[in-house]
Image: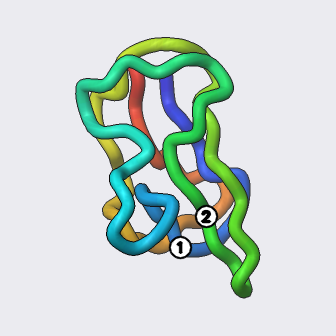
Amino acid sequence: MDIISPLPGIFYRKPGPGKDPYVTEGDSIIAGQTIGLVEIMKQFSEVRADVAGVLVRFEIEDFGIVNPGDVIAVTS
């Protein structure tokens, strides 16, 4: 299952500098769990998993640019 970007901006895997990532590849995740943030014009929006599963891989690098509908991560 794909986790899709809800809006355009910059994708962050961590809540802030020096912090641990929300999740890493291979982690089990639950529905509604935050996997990262998208920033647009200094506003941060959480990206959440729609379903439970295992995070297989990120399709967007940390600090990568995303557009609405872009696949951020893939779960199984």
Foreground pick, 12 / 60: 12
x 38%, y 39%: residue: 23
**Residues at badges 1 and 2 in contact (C-beta under 8 Å)?**
yes
Badge 2: residue crowd in 10 Å (few <14, some 14–19, many ≥20): many
Res 10 label:
1
Foreground pick, 40 / 16: 16
Residue 76 in sight from this viewpoint: no
How far across and down, in percent of the image, does residue 20 sit? 34, 53
- Mark 1 vs mark 2: which is more N-terminal? 1
Badge 1: residue crowd in 10 Å (few <14, some 14–19, many ≥20): some
Foreground pick, 66 / 24: 24
Residue at the limit of the structure toward the bottom, as seen here: 41
How far across and down, in percent of the image, does residue 49 sit? 59, 30
x 66%, y 69%: residue: 8
Amino acid of disc 2? Val
Tell me: 12 left or right of 9.
left
Residue at the limit of the structure toward the left, as seen here: 26
How far across and down, in percent of the image, does residue 75 sit? 41, 23
**Real-space Cα separation, disc 1 to disc 2, in angstroms:** 5 Å
Check the picture and name the quadrant holding the C terminus: top left
Residue 28 in sight from this viewpoint: yes
Q: How many marks?
A: 2
Vertical placement of 66 versus 56: above or below?
below
Amino acid of disc 1? Ile
Tell me: 36 left or right of 22.
right
- Secondary structure of residue under mark 1: strand
Q: Which residue is mark 2?
A: 38
x 62%, y 51%: residue: 5
